[in-house]
Amino acid sequence: MPLGNDIKGDIKGDVKAAGKMRLPWWGVFNDPKLSELEDKLNAANAAMHAELRPAAPRKSSVAAQKRPSTAYRIIWKAIRARKQIVCSYKNRPREVFPHILGYKASGEEAVFMFQVGGESSQPLPPGGDWRCFDLDGIADIQVREGSWRGGSRHRQAQTCIQFVDVDVNVPATLTRPQPLAFGSPALRPPRQPGE
């Protein structure tokens, strides 16, 4: 590696001193001055390469390039067809009606559903209740025929999904030919009460 003016400090002085040393070839390997110089050169080399290396992409830009998962695609189709889903979430069986599918601010896939049966970590009222699920916790998804259900207790906007791909109550989101990836400009903000 050629040494240029960009190497600072006492490395230049050490290089000059090492160049003037007269050691027999077998003494070069045991010389502490050369060992110290080698450590400094290795550190300088690593620092130069670190400056040239591109920064690791942030999580959000990585997620922007990721295609929607298989679970996401199944739920996307179920919402468009207004179908019930039976699945397990965090190892508990669930019977749900998916209403809104999209992404959290971090890029994680999430779905806002109305749960009518199965188990839950919190008590489920007799008529069902709204739940937000991270898709990475969902397994064994089965789409089921039957009448569509939603909750009547919907007093405030959901806060689960910040970037909406499909919302059963927004017709414009139901006509896309395929699911949107995180980062797509076509993703919309959540619906507000009264919309």
Image (cartoon, grey):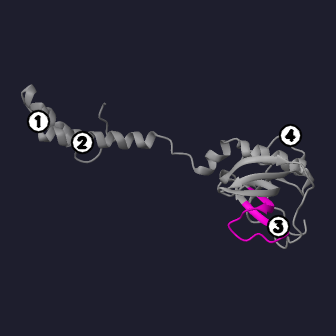
Circle 4 sits on which residue? Answer: 177
Circle 1 sits on which residue? Answer: 30
Categorize mark 2 by other alpha carbons within 10 Å: few (<14), some (14-19), many (20+).
few
Query: In the image, what residue type sits under mark 4?
Result: Pro
Q: Position of residue 59 (x, y in %)?
A: 59, 50
Q: Is residue 38 magenta?
A: no
Whether tag 3 and tag 1 are in contact, CB under 8 A, the answer is no
Q: Position of residue 67 (x, y in %)?
A: 70, 41
Q: Position of residue 89 (x, y in %)?
A: 69, 56
Separation of marks 4 and 2 at Cα, in angstroms: 58 Å
Separation of marks 3 and 2 at Cα, in angstroms: 66 Å
Whether tag 1 and tag 4 are in contact, CB under 8 A, the answer is no
Which callout, 3 or 2, points to the residue nearer the camera? 3
175 shown above or below 195: above
Query: In the image, what residue type sits under mark 1?
Result: Asn
Which callout, 1 or 4, points to the residue nearer the camera? 4
- Picture residue at 75% right of the left edge, 47% below the top: 141
User: Which residue occupies the foreground of this view, 146 or 188?
Assistant: 146
Q: Which residues are magenta?
A: 111-132
| 161 with respect to 150 (left or right) | left
Residue 36 is drawn in which quadrant? Answer: top left
